[in-house]
Amino acid sequence: MPEINIMPSILAADFGRLAEGCKRAEDSGADQIHVDVMDGVFVPNISFGPDVVKMSAATVSIPQNVHLMVKRPQDHIDAFIRAGSDTVQIHIESVCNIQKTLAKIRKAGKRPAITLNPETPAQAIFQCLENRWVDEVLVMSVHPGFGGQKYLSYVEEKVMEIRRMADWVDIAIDGGIDGETIIPAAAAGCNLFVAGSYLYKQDDMAAAISDLRKKAQDNFCSAI
């Protein structure tokens, strides 16, 4: 079984106390910090830039998992790598040379990852998997752009398809993950879980992360 990771999304943290939000996640047992980057073009919202990744990397010792929801990720890769990103996720739907952009991330010593929106079929990333251009796939279980959305269960079929094709790849899921939805997501084959609103509203984030981890471990791939 691949390693289970719980990754709090600081999009749900208090923007006026982001460093504290990052430290709280680390102190609560999070495996990585997930940073949602939005350009207001690829998605209808604007969020963080490289300086937030730089702040988070300086605040905590766990990896920075950076999700570029931007139209032209190739224009931003260098800045986010310099800021301290450990994994850089780009969208298959973005306007770029996917192979070259992923290769650039890997050449910099970082983990390249490809992301699919809910309606995008798994086949769209098969070339990335067949050629091992990526170490990680992120399946969106909400429409990207805003936190707090409801989990879209139909993406589980896509997760299973990806897991059957590439049992070696890390599969992350992002959107509406909580103590209930993590069960079918893990059963479909996900092993990395982004959770924002659910975790940051908890009085005891450590207990919530521990609960998510156990449920993911207990249910991983049981539906395949």
Image: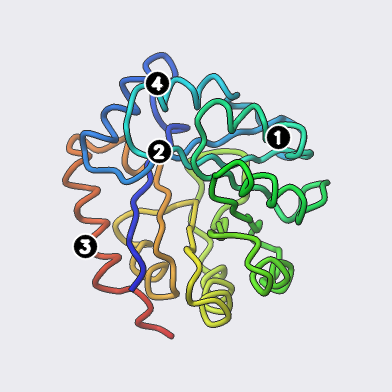
Local crowd at mark 4 within 10 Å, few (<14), some, or many (≥20)? some
Residue 120 vertical position relative to residue 27 in the rendered view, above or below: below
Q: Which residue in the structure is indicated by mark 2?
A: 33
Residue at (82, 47) in percent of width and height: 96
**What is the C-alpha distance between the residues marked 4 and 3?**
27 Å
Q: Position of residue 141 (x, y in %)?
A: 54, 58
Q: Position of residue 17 (x, y in %)?
A: 37, 16
Q: Which numbered disc, 2 or 1, marks the residue that appears first in the sequence?
A: 2
Q: Which numbered disc, 2 or 4, marks the residue that appears first in the sequence?
A: 4
The circle on residue 18 is 4
Examine the image and state in which quarter residue 42 appears. top right
Q: How is the image coloured?
A: rainbow
Give, as a three-letter code, the residue at label 3.
Lys
**What is the C-alpha distance between the residues marked 1 and 3?**
35 Å
Residue 157 vertical position relative to residue 142 in the rendered view, above or below: below
Secondary element type, mark 1: loop
Image position of 71 (left or right of 138): right
**What is the C-alpha distance between the residues marked 2 and 4?**
11 Å
> Mark 2, mark 4: which one is toward the viewer?
2
Q: Which numbered disc, 4 or 3, marks the residue that appears first in the sequence?
A: 4
Q: Which numbered disc, 1 or 3, marks the residue that appears first in the sequence?
A: 1
Q: Position of residue 157 (x, y in %)?
A: 55, 76
> Mark 2, mark 1: which one is toward the viewer?
2
Q: Which residue in the structure is indicated by mark 3?
A: 214
Secondary element type, mark 3: helix
Secondary element type, mark 2: strand
Local crowd at mark 2 within 10 Å, few (<14), some, or many (≥20)? many
Residue at (45, 37) in percent of width and height: 64
Give, as a three-letter code, the residue at label 2.
Ile
